[in-house]
Amino acid sequence: MEQRRKPRTPREKYGEELRLRRVAAGLTQEALGDLVVCSPTLISHFEAGRRLPKPDDARRVDRALGTDGFFARWLEDLESKYADHFASAAELEKQATLIEQFALSLVPGVFQTPDYARALFQAYRPNHTAEELDEAVVIRTKRSRLLDGPLNPVIWTLLDEAVLRRVVGGRQVMAEQLHKIADLAEAGRIRLHVLPNSAGAHALQQSLLTLMSFEDSAPVAYVEAFLTGNLMDDPSLVNSSRTAYALALSDALSQQESLALVRSAAEEHAHGQQ
């Protein structure tokens, strides 16, 4: 008989309780998905603690399992510090074994230095206090803990050259930021590629994209725009996203060429060159 790992986090405990109640009700993941109006894959993510249901989904779970608002009430205690559109993706990011990401104009959040992150928050928060900025920066830069493990997750990072050229926070901030990315690549912690401006149009020109794969469940894709994000687990959409990533990657510079370009851009910023 398969032994299940004991739930450790509040989200995992929530998911395990959902699994136990579902089994007690004699329902498969497919059957519960039909009642909640979502995919069986999403139910599996709920039960593994990788994602939390939205409030409407939690209420439908309660109706399907006859749990009298239990899961909806518990959900209120598990609210994320991240923006609603990114909260689920942030939790999945921690559990992925492979992350393949493309950044169109800004450094991915997991790599951002405090100064780079602060400059971004200042740019779109016209009315802010120092305390609010400090809190936002701490939340953003905590994501870098994902890199603490020497091997997992495996991270492929594809950057549009615009990420290297746009000055965020001043040239010294940019130099520090780009050197950090290059250091990670040279240390073997990430696989780094740059899509040069000379590549012209490419398959991911319209959006950033993150692909996440897991040891024991189906992969997902996440795309994001201003104040909105879409986490997709539909196999056809994930496959289309993976194809677009592969096409864009085929137009990118090699790792060594990319690393040289990132270092060169960092030095140009450091010396105030255009």
Image: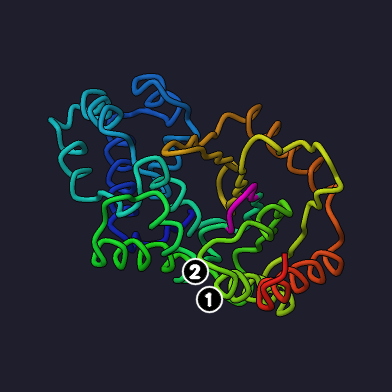
**Residues marked 1 and 2 touching at CB (< 8 Å):** yes
Q: Main secondary structure of the magenta part?
A: loop
Colour mode of the rendering = rainbow
How far from the left and from the top, in percent, is residue 272? 67, 73
Position of residue 107 measured from the top left corner of the image (x, y, whole percent): 59, 58
Q: Secondary structure at mark 1?
A: loop
Q: Amino acid at mark 1?
A: Asp
| Residue type beneath disc 2 | Ser
**Relative to 5, residue 204 above or below:** above
- Left or right: 209 in relation to 259: left
Q: Is residue 145 visible?
A: no
Does 31 sit above or below residue 218? Answer: above
Decide: few, some or many residues near mark 1? Use Cα within 10 Å; few <14, some 14-19, many ≥20: few
Tag 2, which secondary structure?
helix
Residue 26 falls in image quadrant: top left
Look at the image and give the residue range highlighted in magenta. 103-107
In this rendering, would 213 be left or right of 60? Answer: right
Depicted 203 relative to depicted 149: above or below: above
Q: Residue at x 74, y 42 (%)?
A: 245
Quadrant showing the C terminus: bottom right
The circle drawn on residue 148 is 1
Residue located beneath label 2 in the image: 144
Question: Residue at point 48% right, 59% down?
Answer: 94
| Residue 160 within the magenta-colored segment of the rendering | no
Residue 141 drawn at (x, y percent):
44, 67
Q: Nearer the viewer, residue 192 or 114?
A: 114
Nearer to the camera, 28 or 81: 81
Q: Residue at image x 42%, y 35%? A: 43
